[in-house]
């Protein structure tokens, strides 16, 4: 299957990306995860288990990012 990207309008391109992403997300077990990422996630989980109080909620992290990350 080949898609002529140049023939798509600007409005069609994000829709194509969204459709591709939805298709990929519908098969999460098929998405390869790099070993370095698995290692990093394991490290972070171990760090969290040592001190759960050091974790922040998504809302807290988002607020920090929007403030400039301090």
Image (spheres, rainbow, N blue to C red):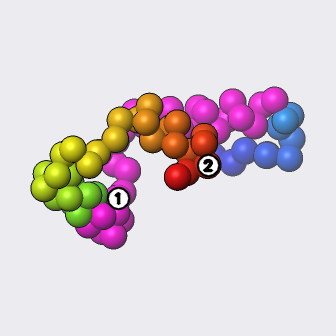
Q: Residues within 10 Å of mark 2 (few under 14, many from 20)?
A: few
Q: Is residue 29 magenta?
A: yes
Q: Is residue 28 magenta?
A: yes
* Residue sticking out furthest to the bottom: 36
Number of residue marks: 2
28 or 65: nearer the viewer? 65
| Pointer 1 residue | 33
Q: Is residue 45 left or right of residue 70?
A: left
Residue 28 visible somewhere in the drawing? yes
11 or 41: nearer the viewer? 41
Q: Residues within 10 Å of mark 1 (few under 14, many from 20)?
A: few
Residue 37, position in %: x, y?
Answer: 34, 63
**Quarter of the view holding residue 66:** top right
> Does residue 13 sit above or below 55 in this rendering?
above
Question: Residue at position x 26%, y 58% from top?
Answer: 44
Which numbered circle lies on residue 68? 2
* Real-space Cα separation, disc 2 to disc 1, in angstroms: 30 Å
Which numbered circle lies on residue 61? none
> Does residue 4 sit above or below 22 in this rendering?
below
What span is colored magenta in the figure? Answer: 11-40
Question: Residue at position x 52%, y 52% from top?
Answer: 70
Circle 2 — which element?
Answer: loop
48 or 19: nearer the viewer? 48
Q: Is residue 39 left or right of residue 26?
A: left
* Residue sticking out furthest to the left: 50
Give yes or no for contact between labels 2 and 1 (Cβ–Cβ under 8 Å).
no
Q: Is residue 4 left or right of residue 39?
A: right
Residue 15, position in %: x, y?
Answer: 69, 30
Circle 1 — which element?
Answer: loop
């Amino acid at each position: 299957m080949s898609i002529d990207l140049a023939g798509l309008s600007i409005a069609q391109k994000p829709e194509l990306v969204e459709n591709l992403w939805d298709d990929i997300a519908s098969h999460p077990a098929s998405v390869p995860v790099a070993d370095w990422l698995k290692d990093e996630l394991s490290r972070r989980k171990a760090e969290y288990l040592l001190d759960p109080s050091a974790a922040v909620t998504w809302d807290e992290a988002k607020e920090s990012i929007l403030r400039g990350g301090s």
